[in-house]
Image (cartoon, helix red, strand yellow):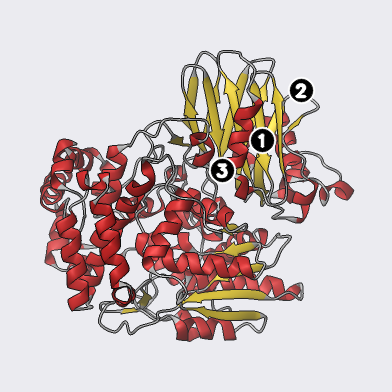
């Protein structure tokens, strides 16, 4: 994805060109195909270009518009045909109209309401010199990143946090953010980062900045989607396929070859199948990458799970003759290298450190093979492949599927369920975490957590309401997933696109009544299973088992035991000792060396690696940046 950056001097002083150069240099990897900037008195915009679509080659940003505005953007719009019609763009001109030109026309027509009309992955900034007003916005739920910093004198924004740090923004640790990462806090604060003074603009949000005030608001709520009522289940399937097909097809508009991540399941499998179908019609091929284990996973995945997705992925790939399938075992990297690469790219510790090594291997492979667009299906669990949560439909079903304890919780009145969950939170908040108890107590984390659970209606209702549970997974208006993937893609000079997070797909699947996701014989995920008839082999389409990523993590760690010991010692010599329970991390490390089981693997994920991810961050934090971006 391309990147943008800019400065607004709130005190009216002209922008220092050296500051713009510092920002551009700090995020140079976002612009392999061009870099430019424009200074207009107290405001300056910049763009770093990745030619990710045929029209991107014609982009010229930032620029002053015919109406006197200053505009910069990074965008891939997926509703170009509809926008061209709404904006009265003549047919001969539509193919050559760039996405930023569509944004310009949309802003001229709808003003600050234009985000409602832009589908795809995008972020933008518009400066109006007449009103001295800066407008910044980000897409509904896409793979984009946008950060900002403000003090008394200036406001600065960028797709990459390093560009803001290059301005000399102080690195003050956001301790609460760190604590929430370590304990897997539900409903993470989406506007915060590991840096106290740097904020993230969440998806579906916009903001205006003037010398007098700054306002941030959410312009779209998936939660307001009404339920859809159609006469037959077949009509839901037809409508879903139409919307989902449009989402996949729109993300195939690429100026470089397209690839897809392919697991053995329904989310990435359906993305792969629809993409292969559309590309075949254009006589094009599709590269598909499957991350596979190096070691045996039989004892580490638990019931109804599988750790090696090779056979299911192979069958999906073989079902479509234009798929070039590759198994990637990440033998050239390791879990520690994955942590270091993620810190270099995202510059803050994250939740899913155990997966970074195979993600890094996959992205490096795609980059080396000249891939420009990488499709994923990561957002599908609560949208296209929602189970329907039949266990929440009735107490009898809950008792049968989840046991009497869960059934009792479902039957409790709201106040009693809240009391039960807060009591459990009090007991379990530190379990499976590397957080140092003294650090947590200093922050009053236990009390904060209990209070958050007690007053958060959606958290409580997710134990008995399917819709609340879905929103807890999707996190509309607050998900961090899009910014992480945007930065990973930029680091490898490609764009990661996820059709399962398309606004239209989210709204359609949320509107389908839950009972339609359950099949006539109790099968889960029945909407996607039905829709994929003829697109996926039945062995994959009807499979009820689920894959588990990084299932051979324990053996991979044991193969680099000296490096793990060294990393633990390095962390022990850093400021991380004030935040991490090193003895607990070492105990998890010792346990996985003795036995590779489901329990020891889970502790290696949540205690050892998540702790190391935070700890290795501290080894570079005092220097203002975790490390240089790997090549």
Tell me the element at label 1: strand
Which numbered disc flags the more N-terminal residue, 1 or 2? 1
Q: Label 2 vs label 3: CA separation?
A: 24 Å
Tag shown at residue 528: none
Q: Is residue 375 visible?
A: yes
Foreground of the two, 338 or 379: 338
On the image, the x and y values in percent for residue 182 come to: 26, 50
Q: Label 3 vs label 1: CA separation?
A: 19 Å
Q: Is residue 48 above or below residue 582?
A: above
Q: Residues within 10 Å of mark 2 (few under 14, many from 20)?
A: few
Residue 139 in the figure: left or right of residue 70: left
Q: Which residue is label 1 attached to? A: 46
Numbered disc in front, either 2 or 3: 2
Q: Please tell me which residue is depicted at 29% across the width and 84% down the height of the picture.
A: 298
Residue 469 in the figure: left or right of residue 151: left
Q: Label 1 vs label 2: CA separation?
A: 17 Å
Q: Please tell me which residue is depicted at 72% across the width and 51% down the height of the picture.
A: 33
On the image, the x and y values in percent for residue 382 come to: 41, 59
Q: Please tell me which residue is depicted at 67% across the width and 62% down the height of the picture.
A: 252
Q: Quadrant of residue 441?
A: top left
Residue 279 in the figure: left or right of residue 274: right
Q: Which residue is label 3 attached to? A: 139
Q: Residues within 10 Å of mark 3 (few under 14, many from 20)?
A: many
Q: Is residue 400 above or below residue 181?
A: below
Numbered disc in front, either 1 or 2: 1
Q: Residues within 10 Å of mark 1 (few under 14, many from 20)?
A: many
- Asked if the residue under mark 2 is in contact with the one under mark 1, i.e. CB atoms within 8 Å, the reply is no
On the image, the x and y values in percent for residue 65 come to: 77, 29
Which numbered disc flags the more N-terminal residue, 3 or 1? 1
Q: Which residue is label 2 attached to? A: 68
Foreground of the two, 581 or 520: 581
Residue 202 in the figure: left or right of residue 107: left
């Amino acid at each position: 994805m391309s990147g943008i950056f800019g400065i607004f001097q709130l005190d009216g002083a002209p922008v220092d060109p050296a500051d713009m150069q510092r920002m551009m240099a700090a995020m140079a990897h976002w612009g392999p195909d061009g870099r430019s900037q424009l200074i207009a008195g107290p405001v300056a915009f910049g763009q770093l270009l990745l030619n990710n679509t045929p029209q991107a080659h014609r982009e010229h940003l930032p620029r002053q518009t015919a109406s006197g505005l200053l505009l910069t953007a990074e965008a891939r719009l997926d509703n170009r045909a509809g926008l061209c019609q709404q904006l009265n763009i003549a047919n001969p001109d539509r193919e050559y109209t760039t996405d930023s030109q569509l944004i310009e026309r949309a802003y001229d027509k709808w003003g600050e309401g234009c985000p409602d009309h832009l589908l795809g992955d995008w972020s933008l900034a518009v400066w109006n010199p007449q009103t001295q007003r800066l407008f910044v916005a980000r897409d509904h739920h896409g793979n984009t990143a946008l950060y900002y910093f403000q003090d008394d004198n200036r406001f600065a924004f960028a797709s990459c946090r390093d560009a803001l740090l290059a301005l000399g923004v102080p690195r003050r640790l956001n301790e609460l953010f760190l604590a929430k990462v370590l304990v897997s806090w539900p409903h993470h604060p989406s506007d915060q980062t590991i840096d106290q003074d740097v904020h993230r603009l969440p998806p579906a949000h916009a903001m205006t900045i003037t010398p007098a005030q700054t306002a941030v608001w959410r312009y779209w709520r998936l939660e307001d989607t009404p339920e859809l009522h159609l006469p037959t289940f077949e009509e839901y399937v037809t409508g879903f396929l139409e919307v989902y097909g449009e989402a996949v097809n729109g993300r195939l508009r690429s100026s470089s070859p397209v690839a897809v991540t392919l697991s053995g399941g329904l989310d990435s499998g359906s993305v792969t199948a629809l993409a292969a179908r559309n590309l075949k019609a254009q006589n094009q091929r599709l590269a598909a990458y499957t991350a596979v284990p190096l070691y045996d996973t039989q004892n580490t995945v638990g019931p109804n799970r599988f750790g090696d997705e090779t056979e299911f992925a192979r069958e999906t790939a073989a079902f479509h003759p234009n798929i070039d399938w590759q198994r990637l075992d990440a033998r050239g990297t390791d879990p520690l290298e994955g942590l270091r690469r993620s810190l270099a790219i995202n510059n803050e510790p994250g939740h899913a450190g155990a997966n970074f090594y195979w993600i890094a291997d996959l992205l490096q492979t795609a980059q080396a093979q000249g891939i420009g667009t990488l499709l994923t299906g990561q957002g599908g669990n609560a949208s296209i492949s929602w189970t329907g949560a039949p266990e929440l439909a009735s107490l009898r079903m809950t008792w049968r599927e989840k046991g009497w304890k869960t059934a009792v919780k479902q039957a409790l009145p709201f106040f009693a369920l809240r009391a039960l969950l807060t009591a459990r939170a009090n007991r379990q908040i530190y379990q499976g975490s590397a957080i140092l108890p003294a650090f947590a107590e200093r922050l009053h984390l236990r009390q904060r957590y209990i209070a958050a659970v007690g007053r958060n209606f959606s958290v409580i209702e997710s134990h008995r309401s399917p819709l609340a549970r879905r929103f807890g997974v999707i996190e509309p208006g607050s998900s961090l997933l899009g910014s992480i993937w945007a930065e990973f893609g930029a680091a490898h000079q490609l764009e990661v696109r996820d059709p399962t997070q398309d606004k239209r797909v989210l709204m359609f699947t949320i509107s389908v009544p839950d009972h339609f996701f359950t099949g006539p014989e109790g099968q889960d995920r029945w909407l996607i299973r039905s829709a994929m008839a003829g697109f996926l082999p039945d062995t994959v389409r009807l499979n009820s088992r689920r894959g588990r990523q990084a299932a051979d993590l324990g053996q991979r760690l044991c193969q680099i035991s000296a490096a793990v010991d060294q990393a633990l010692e390095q962390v022990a010599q850093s400021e991380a000792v004030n935040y991490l329970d090193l003895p607990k991390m070492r105990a998890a490390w010792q346990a996985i060396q003795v036995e590779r089981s489901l329990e020891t693997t889970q502790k290696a994920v949540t205690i050892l690696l998540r702790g190391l991810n935070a700890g290795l961050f501290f080894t570079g934090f005092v220097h203002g940046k975790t490390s240089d971006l790997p090549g």
